[in-house]
Image (spheres, coloured by chain):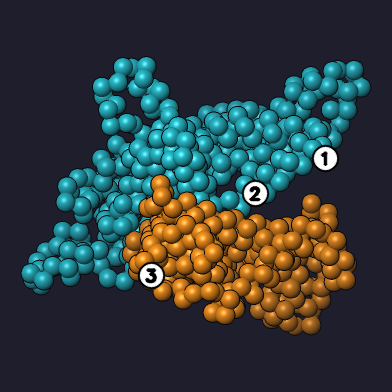
Chain colours: A orange, B cyan
Amino acid sequence: MKTDFWKRFSKNKMALAGSCVVIMLFVISLLAPWIAPYDPNEIDLQKVLSAPSRDHVLGTDQLGRDVFTRMIWGSRISLKVGFVATGIAILIGTVLGAVAGYYGRWVDAVIMRFVDIMLCFPTFFLILAVIALLEPSIWNIMIIIGVTGWMGITRLVRADFTSLKERDFVLAARAIGASDLRIIFVHILPNAMASVLVAATLGVAGAILTESALSFLGIGVQPPTPSWGNILTAGKDNIDIAWWLSLYPGMAILITVLGYNLLGEGIRDSLDPRLR
Amino acid sequence: MIRYIVKRLIFMVPLLIGITIVCFVVMHLAPGSPTDLETQMNPRASAEYRERLKAMYDLDKPLHEQYLIWVGKLAVLDLGRSFSPDRRPVSEKIMERLPITISLNVLSLILILIIAIPIGVLSAVYQDSLFDKVTGIFVFIGFAMPTFWLALLLMILFGVNLGWLPISGIRSLNYEYLPPGMAIVDLITHLILPVTLAAFGGLAGLSRYMRSNMLEVIRQDYIMTARAKGLSERVIIYRHALRNALLPVITILGLSIPGLIGGSVIFETIFAIPGMGQLFYMSVMARDYPVVMGVLFIGAVLTLLGNLIADVSYAVADPRIRVS
């Protein structure tokens, strides 16, 4: 099973391209202090909004800070938000989905109706409403994106659990007296992890997009902390004079999200070629 | 048919109650009280004034009572008054902006349909052709595209560099002095960018969905029967296959409504369009809780209504649904 996966995965060009992008991003954000040519918060009023040049390959922003440097540091934010927010969504989604699928009956009915209700809210509205009540810090952003994004995963996990719990190995586990908790987490959950993994990879992409949109609107990561979204805000404010502020950070978001999407689809195709 | 609609309406009631509970919980989970803005920021606010303000918003009563009072007002569309200096009723503020948001979303839905369905059908009919591959790549990029960034780029290209399209508002400043013909042109040029961009997000998803639907339908037995009868390929594809592949699209359209409504916050803010999304954004920035809760509630109700319309149209199109 595992060797089959790797065989298929290594033959899938799209998946490999996706993994390259993701690995590169990890390296960049890990090495940010060493590879960034300037200090991300170094203000140089002599060079406000200067176009890309040899000194500043991607130009400078409205305070004369180096855009390339700020984008490198910004990759840390995307990575952090992507993983923490998705982690929260996975945790809530998996537990609720597992409980609903395993116990069925009224437990299932209650949880799934709750999912239906949450899905009625435009996610972006829900996020904004909560932000109105809290301070827009990076931690709050991560938590809010996670807490409003678990419904899809709940449905996935529940579907897996409702079919898996009827299988013989679950009956066998129950026969030797395993507790419900043990059956859910030790026996069934590992079998449901495949679809969760795919959803998680795609979820990271979604969380990065959401964070950048929030930061762009000025209610996400707050300056001076650099994020791709809030560099784009400066791009909008100087739309008629500084195109580089709009072009490059967006490209970074596009490539990152594309990378995670390709990786996610690659994992899905390699796990089970029939799902294509 | 009427029985089916009534059944769907009854199913909506628990969801509606759930929506009110979630709205209420969101409003009350937050630390602090909604009146803090007026009291903490205001050093002259006495303890007595604070109590009076709380009583005014029923914040001194137990939670379940507050909920019942709130729902009671909601039933008659009383969403309270805005915290902003104008103190206008929330429902009035939303209602004057709702038509703009709904028309924008309907326009972009129509645009999505017009573009995505032919793309999906053609890439299924000519599977693995160059066209199919190119649109496949386009779809992948479309899924990953931050649309607000695309908006910025198009604003730079068409608004700043080429100067072809206006980049903010839905009307020019001199709108009232334009002759009627020019006024319509003015409105259209203002709407091109926002509508195109709002549609962009849905394009990728729907064209891919249409493609896989079409591929599935083409393999069905009745298509083979049609071929065996010697019908022309054109009749097979456009009369027999397309009709059946189009059915599930209705459901997808219903499901895409929350995304479109949510997206309106971004587009209306970027393009300075005075719709519900912009109102929501401004109220979030100003912490105008009654308006925030009102828009959140209306957004969810719109989604619910959209799904109802989708369900009913599906039932109209496919009689099998009504029976089961």
Q: Mark yes or no: residue B17 visible.
A: no
User: Viewer-nearest of labels 3 and 1?
Assistant: 3
Image position of A177 with respect to B59: above or below:
below
In contact (CB < 8 Å): disc 3 and disc 1: no
Q: Which mark is residue B141?
A: 2
Image position of B26 with respect to B187: above or below:
below
Q: Are marks 3 and 1 on the same chain?
A: no
Image position of B101 with respect to B188: above or below:
below
Report which quarter residue A263 is drawn in: bottom right
Report which quarter residue A86 is drawn in: bottom right
Q: Residue at x 33, y 31 (%)?
A: B171
Q: Which mark is residue A44?
A: 3
Q: Residue at x 61, y 53 (%)?
A: B144
Kind of residue at disc 2: Ile
Q: Residue A50: x, y in percent?
A: 43, 59
Q: Residue B127: x, y in percent?
A: 81, 37
Secondary structure state at the residue bearing disc 3: loop
Residue furthest right in the image: B228
Whichever of callouts 2 and 1 sits on the residue coming sooner in the sequence is 1
Q: Residue B76: x, y in percent?
A: 28, 42
Give the chain letter at badge 3.
A
Give the chain letter at badge 2.
B
